[in-house]
Amino acid sequence: MPKYRSLTSQRVDQLAPSGIRKFFDLLASIEGVISLGVGEPDFATPWHISEQAIFSLEKGNTRYTSNLGVPELRQELSRYLKDNYNLAYDPDGELLITVGVSEGLDLIMRAILDPGDEVIMPDPCYVSYNACVTLAGGTPVMVPTNQKNDFEVSAADIEARVTGKTKAILIGYPANPTGAVMPKDKLQQIAEVAQRHHLLVISDEIYAKLVYGVEHTCFATLPGMKESTVFLGGFSKAYAMTGWRIGYAASSRDIIAAMTKIHQYTIMCAPTMAQVAAIEALRTGEPSVLEMVEDYNRRRQVIVKGLNDIGLPCFEPRGAFYAFPSIKGTGMTSEEFAEKLLVEEKVAVVPGPAFGQCGEGYVRCCYATSLADIEEALSRMKRFVTRHKKG
Ligand SMILES: Cc1ncc(COP(=O)(O)O)c(C=O)c1O
């Protein structure tokens, strides 16, 4: 038999599949599972938003749009960013409408990285961060974070990892998987590191609207940082629009032009009907967002208290819709805990190491599900933890 070269690239061969997906294949084979797994709202998109897309389809609005996104959406987004953060982005050149923040992350990495360039990011972090950097030929450099420090990323820890190859710092807050919100003073310190070393800051703020009793600081608003920040935002979480696949990038003209070069060849434009829905979301979606946030907050309080009462210590997440309890007291690894909990009690959580090595000893519980399901999941988890108590 002749030996052929692998038909897939080494880069892809070496990439580990997402720890979340692997787990959910197992989940799909079991009936009656309560899922605290996938990170998406249980709400349907507010009807008035969906309806605008339907009207637009009825009018035959089914063609490509400008590569940058429909002008009306970019104008509305520019107004929204001004009203919410007092940030002025020119809709013609400083904003790009993307297929979710997912595309924004991929584009920015491909736009800035040459082989071997480094991007510094927190551990644990959203599963795509590492993969997007690797696929773009770069090297992810992880900064450990821990429960003792509320999973905040320290500027000193970032600075200690800056080398001649560092291109950017990638942060995401409110954070997936921990729910941590970065306070303004800590962000300011990160901005100073970026300025000292002439680095770009890529700030994934997809959960910006989902905060509970604290303020979200938009990174680009920090003094002198607008031009060197790539602000990634989206509609998936706050407006319950995960399936619409729509997001945006806001940055300097040069960065947006570089991202657009890739976007125009690979994507062409974000889905037209989703862009129409996004316009409506920006114009009239705020009351629905506030209602959902209130609901998430109630669920957050129940789950955090419940987990702590069971003996799974959980720091108080102030954003997103995740709780990240420690399972170290059970003596199991995160993977063992999640697998056994799924098989024995039919509750799905995600093992912490899916988000990086520092996630070992933790599991991610998404509370964007009904209160009744959260309460039932907690009682099953209590039974499970009691049964497996050491000693
Ligand atoms: C931190 C973070 N960034 C980006 C994304 C991807 O979002 P989108 O649906 O806009 O692609 C997610 C989805 O879970 C996320 O948690």
Image (cartoon, rainbow, N blue to C red):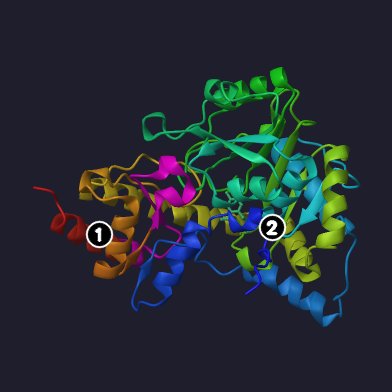
Q: How many marks?
A: 2
Question: Which label's residue is closer to the chain start, 1 or 2?
Answer: 2
Identify which residue is drawn at 60% across, 58% down: 13
Label 1 belongs to which residue? 381
Alpha carbon separation for disc pair 1 and 2: 34 Å
Q: Amino acid at mark 2?
A: Gly
Mark 2 — residue?
A: 100
Can the viewer see residue 153? yes
Pointer 2: residues within 10 angstroms few (<14), some, or many (20+)?
A: many
Residue 228 within the segment the image draws in magenta: no
Instruction: Give the label on residue 220, or none.
Output: none
Expressed as whole percent of the image width and height from the top left, the position of residue 202 reads: 68, 38
* Residue at the image point whose x is 50% and y is 59% from the top: 39
Question: Label 1 CB, ligand 1: below 8 Å?
Answer: no
Highlighted range, magenta: 350-375
In what element is the residue under mark 2? helix
Figure quadrant of residue 386 = bottom left
Q: Position of residue 268 (x, y in %)?
A: 85, 63
Ligand 1's quadrant is bottom right
- What is the three-letter code of the residue carrying label 1? Met
SS class, disc 1: helix
